[in-house]
Amino acid sequence: MLTKIEELLQEVDQLTAQNAEELEALRIKYLSKKGIINALMADFRNVPAEQKKQVGMKLNELKTRTQERIAALKETFENQDADMSGIDLTRTAYPIGLGTRHPLNIVRNQIIDIFSRLGFTIADGPEVEDDLHVFTKMNFAPDHPARDMQDTFFVETNPDDVTKNIILRTHTSSVQARTMEVTQPPIRVICPGRVYRNEAISYRAHCFFHQVEGLYVDKNVSFTDLKQVLLQFAQEMFGPETKIRLRPSYFPFTEPSAEMDISCHICGGEGCPFCKYTGWVEILGCGMVDPAVLDACGIDSKVYSGYAFGMGVERIANLKYKVKDLRMFSENDTRFLEEFEAAN
Ligand code: DAH
């Protein structure tokens, strides 16, 4: 019996199983009621008394070793589940809902695209700006109402020197100032970006919105150049039938200044509720860069002239997509955003 147990001890140490069924078969073979070990236990009473102690110990050893071996094999199966080797990490876990481009980004990209083809490059600047670039270099008088608390978000005020006030930019014209500071003409840039104004939030105003401004400075730049570029833009954006109209206006940084209207693309200029029966809708502000702005930014206004324009991306998006409530652009409601899937 001892030799039999010794043989079994060796056998048990070599046990292997490929899967749970094989393991179960081993358990039945060795450890079940009718298994090998139980049979040996039953034989134990035939062992001569003087050998009982030794055989008993060996038999117990066999039983625990078998239990341990089977438990160890079982553990390897369980660990196999957590083993990453069988997992295909490239497989889609579950259908991933693809997002859609935000309508404001769609429109901004269209604007950028049109002006890129006209030779404009993109300029960028900080949203947290100083007064110097937002207002002072843009020729705003020290007491201009735009500097008031109602319009501008102040981050840090400097009682000794307003030009050092730190504010959230109220327009992207600050990027024009920054570009001119470091570049000599010819300059032909567009500045897309987010701007902030301290406004009560309603369906038609928010405390932040997006602009794209343009700046062209070179020798002999004229108002005709401005008008032609804006006509080209309007027709590419709203269709080849689109007409434009410039109305005199005022901005501190341009002289002369104008507001541009496009013929109403809903009624084609006939007059409808959308254009309030005028046949025209306003889309941007523009003008010839005031010589004072050029000089303040280190460009010789006696040698160079330039034009600038600025438009609200939300406004253009509203015209294209007729979004009635401006707040929807920043609510992140996927039901709204998914409506622009086709426009991607
Ligand atoms: N900065 C103006 C605004 O925020 C828009 C604007 C008008 C920009 C005329 C320009 C411009 O560059 O020439 O309302």
Image (cartoon, rainbow, N blue to C red):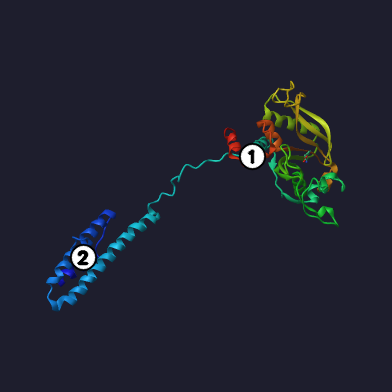
Q: Quadrant of residue 34?
A: bottom left
Return the disc, 2 or 1, that comes first in the chain's sequence: 2
Up-down relation of residue 73 to residue 226 (above or below): below
Q: Residues within 10 Å of mark 2 (few under 14, many from 20)?
A: few
Amino acid type, callout 1: Asn
Q: How many marks?
A: 2
Picture coordinates of residue 94, whole percent (x, y): 46, 44
Picture coordinates of residue 205, whole percent (x, y): 74, 39
Up-down relation of residue 167 to residue 120 (above or below): below
Q: Which mark is residue 11?
A: 2
The residue that label 1 is drawn on is 105
Q: Nearer the viewer, residue 233 or 220?
A: 233
Q: Marks 2 and 1, how far apart in space?
A: 71 Å
The C terminus - image quarter:
top right
Horizontal side of residue 83 vs 220, given as left or right: left
Q: Secondary structure at mark 1?
A: helix
Q: Secondary structure at mark 2?
A: helix
